[in-house]
Image: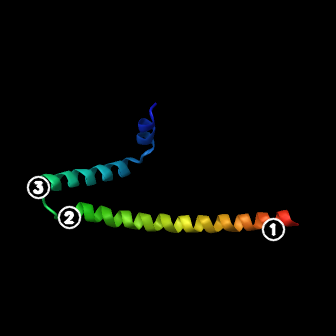
């Protein structure tokens, strides 16, 4: 199994579909040479922005937990 096959097998179907929809819309705009943004792309952009914000929050929480665990470990090692 190649790396590409592995990537595709672990990508959620809805994520792959959304990415392909965005690519199709971009190709249509290139063909039509229009700068109009379709509602599908705007909706996807909003969803992606929300997902990015959610993931950033989760990342911040995880980083905080790691710092607290490292601090506790360091304190235990000093005793």
> Which residue is depicted at the point 16% across and 54% down?
30
Under tag 1, what secondary structure? helix
> Which residue is depicted at the point 38% across and 66% down?
49
Residue position marked by numbered label 2 in the rendering = 37
Please rate how many residues cluster around mark 2, counting C-alpha atoms within 10 Å: few if below 14, some from 14 to 19, many from 20. Answer: few
**From mark 2 to mark 1, how far is it between C-alphas?**
55 Å
> Which residue is depicted at the point 32% across and 64% down?
45
Any mark on residue 61, and which? none
**Labelled pair 2, 3 in contact (Cβ < 8 Å):** no
Q: Quadrant of residue 70?
A: bottom right
Q: Quadrant of residue 44?
A: bottom left
Residue 58: % across, % down: 54, 65
> Which residue is depicted at the point 70% across and 68% down?
68
Q: Residue furthest top?
A: 1
Any mark on residue 75, and which? 1
Q: Is residue 21 above or below residue 48?
A: above
Any mark on residue 32, and which? 3
């Amino acid at each position: 199994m190649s790396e590409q096959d592995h990537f595709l097998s672990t990508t959620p179907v809805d994520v792959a579909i959304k990415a392909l929809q965005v690519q199709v819309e971009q190709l249509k705009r290139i063909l039509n040479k229009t700068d109009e943004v379709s509602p599908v792309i705007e909706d996807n952009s909003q969803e992606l922005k929300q997902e990015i914000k959610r993931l950033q929050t989760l990342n911040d929480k995880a980083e905080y937990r790691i710092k607290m665990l490292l601090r506790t470990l360091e304190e235990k090692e000093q005793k």
